Image (tube, helix red, strand yellow):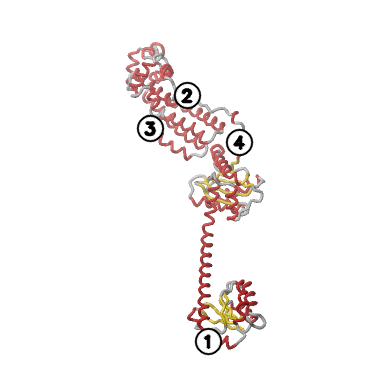
Amino acid sequence: MYKVLLVDDERIIVEGISRKVNWNAYHTELAGTARNGLEAMAFIESHLPDIVISDIKMPGMNGLQLVEKVSEKYPQIAFILLSGFSEFDYARSAMQFGVKHYLLKPCNENTITDALTEVIAELEKQHTQESFMLNIQKELSKVLPHAKEQFLKELVTNKTYGQRDWDDYGNLFHITVENDNVQLLLFQIEGQFEFEHMFAVKNIAQDVLGKSIVLLSTTIGKHVLLLIKEIVEADALFAQLNEIKQTFSTYYKLDATVAVSDAGQIINARKMYRDTLECLNYQFYLGEGSIITQKDVERGDDSSHKPFFYDEEPLCMHVKSGDWSFVQTELENFFTLLADSRMDTQLSMSYVIPLYISIVRQGNPEEINDYLKKIASFDQFFTLRATQQFVTENAEQICLNNFQTHTKKHSSIIHKMIQVIEEHLSNPDLSLNWVASEILYMNADYLGKLFKKETEEKFSNYVMRLRMDKAMEEIEKTGDVKVFELAEKFGFGDNPQYFSQVFKKHTGFTPSEYKRSP
């Protein structure tokens, strides 16, 4: 029901209108009457009616003065003004206060109810609009946090975003940067974690750093990203970051690594984001749970760093023979060299994985596939220590298996023969007679029978198969090796044509075809 106040200094008019109008029929009630503007103002302040029907010409405070005062304090109240014919033009000055309805006295029931109907329709429309706007604001309040998160994602990943976009969205989100300098913080949770843990990190960081410092925050992939105002004092920032990490660890028993960008202008946000990603890569060397800055990853003049080189052949030879003591020492040397190089994580792994594959290939052929399937595990290693442990454990197992196999399968004489073969594989004169007469000083027929009994393979077949296997490895490793070089390296001397024939018989491909095969 809409409440109506009737104002007129003539009692007969007030009583007439009060009786003539069926107020309930128009969803209204006559809340009160007043004899002049002063009484009306007092009633309005205490009862707040929705509609005021008022005469213009009244003592004390006339209708126009009443409209002016009410429109200042209660602009939502609607007016219907009553006036005599001579006052009608004068009444139009009330239009500046939004009054749209005027009735000439004397009024009948129809003119009053028509005016009421129009005013009520306008109030209904106004209430509908206000309700719509309230709902819009309510929905926007729900969407705004997501909009802020999405904007930060776009800001650091979309190369088309610039200063103008920041200005527009900064105004929209009421974000200001006093000195135009900002920093990015990128958090990475270590170990197995749930999605809600990322929100916990974000909320803890906002609480510790303060809402006045944290401008925007979001999650990108498995990372939590914060855009903050520049914190000049590095010690203060590190203290806060350690507090965030400690609080998170206390509640969730998980650690987090933090990458911190250098300070810069907001238009450089994309570069700052790339810098933080690069910092996280160096977690590989610095360890999980570190706070990493650009200073930690600076390597100075790249020209002063020599290319990383490691000859894996001695290592593989001793894995094959089962010499774990040598292999363990050599692996420690390899990973020490790798750590000193401080290469990008992916580049470092490009050296580790081929080494692992080479080690695996020295094991039992029936087990090679099982070891190769473990390559997927490298994606789970985020530190050099974890990677070294994985490679070392598998290399040890392969060495021990090889050692046990050799111990069971070969006598000391056969073991010595195999060593001679491996050491003299490039010698064109390598043969059973040559080994028997020049190395072991034993009967060639006896050695041949003993070798076949324990290896289940003729001496010449064993040598040829080993030469072809090594040749295939050489092609796979180098790619651009020449046929004549392979022939010389694997005991065919200056006869590359014969080498090619043997290679094709063994593999089904010529050396050139094998290079091109997938």
Label 4 sits on a secondary structure element that is loop
Q: Is residue 424 visible?
A: no
- Find disc 3 in the rendering and name its residue: 367
- Find disc 1 in the rendering and name its residue: 19
Label 1 sits on a secondary structure element that is helix
Q: Position of residue 10 (x, y in %)?
A: 61, 87
Which one is earlier in the sequence, the residue at label 4 or at label 1? 1
Residue at horizontal 44%, vertical 23%? 480
Q: Position of residue 85 (x, y in %)?
A: 59, 81
Which one is earlier in the sequence, the residue at label 3 or at label 2? 2
- Find disc 2 in the rendering and name its residue: 314
> Callout 3, which amino acid?
Glu
Q: CA distance from mark 1 to mark 2?
A: 115 Å
Q: Quadrant of residue 397?
A: top left
Label 3 sits on a secondary structure element that is helix
> Callout 1, which amino acid?
Arg
Q: Residues within 10 Å of mark 1 (few under 14, many from 20)?
A: few
Q: CA distance from mark 2 to mark 4?
A: 34 Å
In front: label 2 or label 4: 4
